[in-house]
């Protein structure tokens, strides 16, 4: 049965050093301390902690007399953090009894109980540490009326690296707005802390900070189509103020307004993210064929593609609209969406 090092007798360099043991005995008020072999002859009641596993037992912190109890107290002060709080309290109480010369009665725990207590303590510590983090220490913070969920910690260089790797492998499973928020939070954290973490191209792509040159036209059209005066005013305010915030925030606000106005699924309007984010002019186009990477992609082929291939990117209504006017619809998408559509379409051919 393997148990973590706790008392004097778990450290051979200490208890086999006669000079050191003699000094310990002297400062603890005793004449000598038992050897490890002599400890084996003592009953369980002479120890502050007894760990049982079947017929086997491991005894820690001898308190056979005041001298041994004093030495156990010295070692306990150095090693107590290795024990979960409930066990730590039990041992401390028993050492105090040993120093006072009282009989030890409650000193036994099973190995399974020790393991369970240790796991619980580890979980509690992790939860406590996590709750102490700021919202900016997470890649995603999702707030609803019922709760706030904070996902993907990025509070250290190591965690930022894990988050970047996770995003690169799993971004297609995330809702589009979450991808933008995740990428923005991650790149901001890495830059502000000057972490030595390589940022994948896909994270850079979603951390776009350029607005669609036609965003004001998009907002005016929505303002004119909205039926309620309050929503019209909200679109107008967003149009006047959008340059003061990051495109991610504007796209999220616009998406919420589109939902309220009943325009989110309208085939006459781009989705909020396509309306807000600008296009990269480095993408070369020749007539209806777009150059993506090292191959050509003809958007008209989207008319024959199944929706299931693209459900991580579009709602059924948006995809139907795209298929109805594939060339124009594809050209209106932000660069990152064009690249993903082309990649998926090429993979399906």
Image (tube, rainbow, N blue to C red):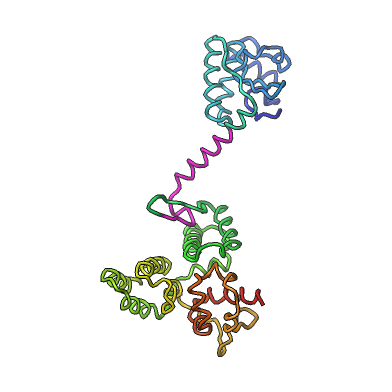
Q: Quadrant of residue 283?
A: bottom right
Q: Quadrant of residue 20?
A: top right
Percent x, y for residue 330? Answer: 52, 80
Q: Is residue 135 magenta?
A: yes
In this view, the residue in front, 116 or 247, is: 116
Q: Specify the farthest residue to the bottom.
A: 287
In this view, the residue in front, 98 or 333, is: 333
In this view, the residue in front, 9 or 206, is: 206
Q: Quadrant of residue 298?
A: bottom right
- Side of 58 where 122 appears, left or right: left
Q: Which residue is pictured at 72% across the width and 20% down the height?
A: 55
**Residue stretch in magenta:** 118-143
Q: Is residue 123 magenta?
A: yes
Percent x, y for residue 166? Answer: 58, 58
Q: Is residue 58 above or below residue 238?
A: above
Q: Is residue 125 above or below residue 186?
A: above
- Side of 248 where 228 appears, left or right: left
In this view, the residue in front, 285 or 62, is: 285
Secondary structure mostly taken by the magenta-highlighted segment of the chain: helix
Q: Which residue is pictured at 54% across the width and 77% down the height?
A: 338
Query: In which quadrant of the rendered image does the N terminus lie?
Result: top right
Percent x, y for residue 161? Answer: 58, 57
Query: In which quadrant of the rendered image does the C terminus lie?
Result: bottom right
């Amino acid at each position: 049965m393997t148990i973590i090092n706790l008392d004097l007798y778990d450290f051979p360099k200490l208890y086999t050093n006669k000079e050191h043991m003699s000094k310990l005995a002297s400062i603890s008020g005793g004449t000598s301390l038992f050897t490890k072999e002599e400890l084996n002859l003592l009953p369980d009641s002479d120890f502050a902690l007894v760990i049982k596993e079947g017929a086997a037992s491991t005894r820690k912190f001898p308190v056979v007399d005041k001298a041994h109890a004093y030495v156990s107290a010295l070692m306990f002060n150095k090693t107590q953090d290795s024990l979960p709080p409930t066990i730590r309290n039990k041992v401390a109480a028993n050492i105090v009894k040993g120093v006072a010369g009282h009989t030890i009665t409650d000193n036994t725990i099973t190995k399974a109980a020790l393991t369970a207590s240790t796991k619980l303590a580890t979980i509690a510590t992790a939860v406590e540490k996590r709750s102490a983090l700021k919202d900016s220490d997470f890649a995603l913070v999702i707030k609803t009326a019922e709760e706030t969920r904070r996902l993907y910690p990025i509070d250290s260089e190591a965690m930022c690296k894990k988050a970047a790797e996770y995003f690169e492998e799993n971004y297609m499973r995330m809702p589009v707005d979450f991808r933008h928020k995740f990428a923005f939070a991650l790149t901001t954290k890495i830059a502000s802390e000057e972490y030595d973490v390589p940022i994948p191209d896909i994270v850079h792509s979603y951390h776009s900070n350029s607005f669609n040159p036609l965003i004001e036209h998009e907002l005016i059209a929505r303002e004119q189509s909205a039926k309620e005066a309050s929503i019209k005013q909200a679109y107008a305010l967003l149009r006047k103020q959008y340059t003061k915030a990051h495109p991610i925030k504007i796209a999220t606000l616009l998406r919420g307004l589109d939902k309220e106005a009943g325009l989110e699924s309208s085939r006459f309007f781009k989705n909020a993210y396509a309306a807000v984010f600008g296009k990269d002019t480095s993408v070369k186009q020749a007539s209806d064929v777009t150059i993506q990477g090292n191959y050509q992609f003809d958007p008209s082929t989207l008319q024959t593609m199944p929706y299931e291939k693209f459900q991580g990117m579009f709602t059924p209504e948006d995809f139907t609209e795209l298929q109805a006017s594939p060339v124009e619809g594809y050209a209106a998408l932000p660069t990152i969406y064009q690249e993903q559509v082309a990649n998926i379409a090429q993979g399906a051919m």
